[in-house]
Amino acid sequence: MASININSLAENASRLGMRIQETFSEHTRDLSITRGSGSLFDMPDEKVKNIGRQLDSSSDREKLDAMKRLIALISKGRNVSSYFPQVVKNVASQNLEIRKLVYIYLLRYAEHEPDLALLSINTFQKDLTDSSPLIRAMALRVLSGIKVPMIGSIVVLAIKKCAADISPYVRKAAALAIPKCHQLDEGHQTSLIDIISTLLRDRSPLSIGSAVVAFEAVCPTRLDLLHQQYRRLCRLMVDVDEWGQISLLNLLIRYARVMLPKPVLSHDGEMVEEADSDLQLLLISAEPLFQSKNPAVVLAVVRVFFYIAPPSQHSRFTNPLLRILSNSRAVERVALSYLVVITCAHPHLFSSHYLRLLVRADDPQQVRRDKIRVLLNILNADNYQIILREFTTYAEDMDDEVVGNAIAAIGHCARLIPDCVPQCLAILMDMIRSKQDIIVSNAVQILKSLVQNQLLSGTVVANVTHSPLSIISSLAGKIDDVRHPQAKACVIWLVGQYCVTQESGTFFEGIADWAPDVLRKSARSFSSESNIVKLQILTLSAKLLVMCPTDRTLGLLCHYVFSVARFDIDYDVRDRTRMLASLLAGLSPSISGDEDTQDQGGVVLRREQVKRVLFEGKEDVSVNEVIPGEIHSLIGSLSLTVGKDVGSNTVLPEWLESGIDPTLRVNEDDPVLTPSVTTARSQYPIVSANTAPIVLTPNQSTSPPGNGSKVPWKDLDKFYEDESSEETEESESNSDGEHSNESEEDSHEDNTDDSVTDEDGSSIPNDGREEDQEGVQENTV
Amino acid sequence: MAIDGLIILDSAGRPVIQSGYTSHPPAYPIFHIDALNTALSKATRPEDVDPVLYVPPGFGGEGSACCHVEIGGLRLVASVSGDADPLVAFAFLQAFQDILIDYFGTVNVATLKDNFDTVYQLLEETLDPSGHPLTTSPNALRDIVLPPSLLSKLLASLSPSVNSTHPPKISCSGANAAFASPIPWRKAGVKHNHNEALFDVVEDMQSIVGRNGVTIVSNVWGKIETNAKLSGTPDLTLTFTNPQVLTDCAFHPCVRLQRWSRDRSFSFIPPDGRFVLAEYRYAPPQSVVTGTSGIVPVPLVLKAVMDAGEFGGTLSLTLSSRLSTKTMENVEVEIYLGEDAIGAQCAASSSGTGTVGVGEGGGSWTFDPRRKVLRWEILSMRTSGSCMLRGSWTSKAKAPRPARAFQIRFDIPSYTFSALKVDQLRLSGENYKVYKGVRGRSRGSIEWRW
């Protein structure tokens, strides 16, 4: 008996010891801080089997561990939907950490397992009344993520409930749930639109951005819903979060285009711009956002000014746009692609800022290309000297495409600004001497188009060294150095086309001396040339033969070229040979190589006719344009950045000539404020237009509709008055009960939601952004 | 403007973190990863890869694009399609990157793998499944997603039983405190033992110097990086003795724009912790001689003789500082020698008394055979004297095409180009002394054409 007791005691003791050791090692495992969850992330596969058991265990720590493992597996791209039933059970866990991970899991898989997710729908609904706004928001997120049309009405109810939540964070989640619900079942559109218009009336700027997102997704055409809110949204702009500002600005651009009259220029005596006061309000409210640190916000404001501002205000976006170029390489790349379009439309805005747009050798390829285009766009008589010098430098770039663009840009300069033609020609002639093949070939092609242009237009520059013909003659002299096939073909064509000369004393009458020389050189290397060069050699010999049919040497040379070409490996070359040979049959019967040409009959052209065929009709000077033609994409769209159609379908609506009746925009709750006062920077006084029909009944303390379900609104100033004694003078003078006015103001503290009242209020002296406003209020009271 | 999803790739191009992509076919993110990896492997210089990569449509759909940035050996990738603005994607990537740094200090594969659950929670809170950025202010996020800390790890490992008995008290405290602050960017109820506000004025010079040694363009971009550890709700006013040097400013949302436009002072209630208060461009004083806006002088001189002949060339560089008192550090001169470059042979030396390197006087040089870049580094360059690098390089090409300019980078500690000077920092709303610290730091990146 005693021995048994001792035995069992010993056994128990050893068991206890083992237990302690186990738990100890288990607990210390996670203590190794440096390893952290990394071990979980890269766990061996056999551990995966334990996940199911861990999820069912009663220990929170085990569950948390299992959830982390699941998230790690998701992250590695494994499908872990088989754990769904076990995970769902944990959705009501008391531990917030577990719950958050469960929600993340559910958000991934609720779509794939809607039936199972439905089982837990009660838990989500219960969570909607949780005390933590975080849980309420997450529950709504999962609920709206379950894609079963059956529960559509439950989701609508949940959204409605959350849209009236006291926490703006939950209201934001409600707004974001709306598009998902709409996607699921469009039948709920009317009730959803109601919720959206409630959310748009929200006092807190925090959820406005999401409400706009919902608006764009559910009812983008119902701009009429915005009438009442338009002025308030404009004033609220500064305080909306940065992402919300972007959505809001884009929406208001559309609103302005459809609902406001187009700003017009009237010509009575002098140019007077007329812009609607509501349009001015939008512009003035948007302008301070130029100083946002977020480049996307700055661009959104640029869009506002680019698309709806009257021309005199366009210059406002020059500096902000240039500023975001220095933000980061990626931002520079994207912003430059928009700048190309903007400078196309308004080159004068940037022409004095060319120094900020110079290309650096270490810029990424796309940036270098876009900068060259922008520089070309803004080129004018004042800055061409420096820009031209820059292009010359860029021609030595490491990237072939940039070299091509730079040299083409030089040609473009010459066309845009006639004064710099000699300079451009000098630069290009210089380039032909370069050791780099790519520079030479590009320069030759641009020279060709320049020379041709000049000969055609007849504006021959007085400068003798760079007269078109002397350029051709020097090109002809360099034919051996030109290796690039396209460039070589180009030179040979030029030589053939302009070989006719009036000068006497040349070796062959009527032909410049260099032309037969080029033919001699190229005939020698004919077989080793590429196709386009061969074709041009044929053309050259045909032209020379027409000009000088009697000369024996020339005839032999041509004969040689034609006989070689007739047996060329390429059928294009053979075709061309045959065509030219029959064309020339009247001048040199033997050239076709066949003895029986005479018998073939058909039409034989006379010399004059052949000349006409070969030389005339070459006016079409097409250069590969650096600047593309019309650009349809909007600024701030992906298709503009990648230069390809990516299925974007946003089209900016055209202006309506006369806007809608401005009285529709009158909101009872609007404070009596002239638009300029609400802006942070009122240094741009608006035109007299702000006396537009703002007929307001200011001091009616009606609370805005839709907020009835909330805890009674407590004015911020009141709140501070209660909580602290240190009040600034201004706010004291104001706390005389004008709640409806005060509450509409766009101060930062407006974000206070009612939950603040339970917290110990810390005193915030009045925000400077509303100081001026306060002053005006005092006057109006 | 929607972002389809976010992926974080490790240095080998494998995904570490990946957001839901619930409304896309499963192959969609894979296409993006593949497109990026292919582009990166093709490019000789990784910076030449277009940050907005076009991804052709997979099956019947429309094309999309992959926006990517590099950080700590990782690549953050955001996929965008349709009429989205890539600029929003990049702004979001920047914000997300700032959040990661705020949470984990540094960002690399190890920290992400250690804290992947936190990263997923952050992703959930910052990016809506429909692709709209949500809360990105670190102060607000810290209330929602608890940052990993020693304490929370200890709690998690030591007290599972405590956790289950009093769960709401421990675990939900964060959730209840969330959104309690009346100011979106500042947490409520902050307490610090030492109240201090540190301002780092960081300036970055971007210049291009022409062949003749004349500065063509030179701009200085500044940032005021702030670390505010202040209790309660402090209302600060920062004034400068020379605010006229600031132009083209951009501000953190906390700065009252009206005060700035009225009396050129920064008035703000700061977020808790690190943030960038403002960004600006240095407006140099008008030059008396030319009457135009002056150019910020480049603080060094490079005399470069570069000769590219057949199969290589020679170079001879002389670098000297123009600063009168400050020492320049980590000076790097780089030149790309063209894709056919094979190698280089140089000798670095110094003259005068001023230079101190590690080991020898004129710094050290290396040739990177993968990037084909010749790099010359000088750890520390004093005010007088100069450093020289002479040598030759070889190439496989008959007519080699080296880059047309040298890229020079340098740091100047405790120096600002603008000489921006803080006049005073006033605190209202709280009753304690604030320790104020202001430091300057400069760096530069100069393209010197030869």
Image (cartoon, coloured by chain):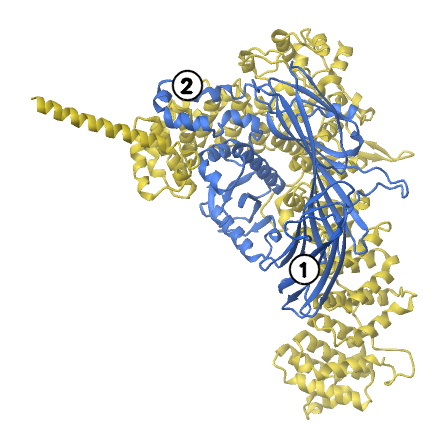
Asked whether B343 or A702 is in front, the reply is: B343
Mark 2 Cα within 10 Å, few/some/many (few <14, many 20+)?
some
Asked whether A284 or A87 is in front, the reply is: A87
Q: What is the quadrant of residue A692 in the picture?
A: top right
Q: Residue A196: x, y in percent?
A: 56, 25
Which chain did the renderer colour blue?
B
Asked whether the viewer can see residue B354, the reply is yes
Mark nearer the N terminus (1 vs 2)? 2
Please state which of the two labelled residues, at mark 1 or mark 2, is closer to the viewer.
1
Q: What is the quadrant of residue B424 in the picture?
A: top right
Q: Residue B160: x, y in percent?
A: 35, 24
* Count of marks, rendered view: 2
Asked whether A235 or B299 is in front, the reply is: B299
Give the answer, above or below, for where A280 lies relative to A329: above
State the residue position of label 2. Answer: B168
Question: Could you say which disc has been placed on residue A445 in the image?
Answer: none
- The chain ID associated with circle 2 is B
* Badge 1 amino acid: Ala
Q: Is residue A580 left or right of residue A761?
A: right
